[in-house]
Image (cartoon, helix red, strand yellow):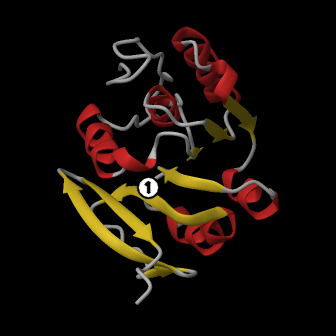
Amino acid sequence: MRVITGTARGKKLETLKGNDVRPTTDMVKEAVFSIIQFQIPGRRFLDMFSGSGQMGIEALSRGAKEAYFLDMSRDAISVIKKNLEATGLSDRGKVANVDSLSFVKTTGEKFDVVFLDPPYGKGICEKALEVLPRVMNRGGVIICETEISETLPETSGDFALDRTYRYGKIKITTYRLPEEE
């Protein structure tokens, strides 16, 4: 697993070991960053259920001002910190060993892009979508990675389902504020 482009282009990233780990594939990562390429520079990125931190690191490498990395696993937090150090991006990364949903419910921080890739089939995306609008800046985007069969709501607060993209067994769903008329 490597950083695709930007200041850390080509840097190898560590990943977690084990059967419970499901890193976002390079194909999906590239697709996600093609979708949001103009919303990254100078913006704040929230990487929920971070795992290795590859999505937030990719955002930082592409010019995000700051990225928050959230994961409940201490092993994941250790890997994220190593990856930030290896890519030279530690100064713009904030790492928290917390439950992602609890963080979103209690933080006063605001974000421009949120990426969530929770464990599949547990309804966690739906729960997150209920609380995410409170931490979003206007013009922001929420991106959910789920199994293709998982059904997501049409709205998330004032945010509306914008597009759905399919990549094999994976689905990427984006939510944005509707254009004002």
The residue closer to the viewer here, 48 or 177, is 177
Residue at the left extreme, as displayed: 168
Q: Is residue 178 above or below residue 28?
A: below
Q: Is residue 50 left or right of residue 35?
A: right
Q: Residue at x 82, y 60 (%)?
A: 106
Q: Is residue 48 visible?
A: no
Q: Position of residue 47 (x, y in %)?
A: 56, 43
Secondary structure found at label 1: loop
Q: Is residue 163 above or below residue 67?
A: below
Q: Is residue 100 above or below residue 176?
A: above
Q: Residue at x 28, y 32 (%)?
A: 26
In the picture of the structure, the residue carrying the numbered disc 1 is: 120
Q: Position of residue 164 (x, y in %)?
A: 27, 66
Residue at the front extreme, as displayed: 181
Q: Position of residue 86 (x, y in %)?
A: 55, 9
Q: Position of residue 107 (x, y in %)?
A: 80, 56
Q: Quadrant of the N terminus?
A: top left
The residue closer to the viewer here, 67 or 7, is 7
Q: Is residue 177 left or right of residue 149?
A: right
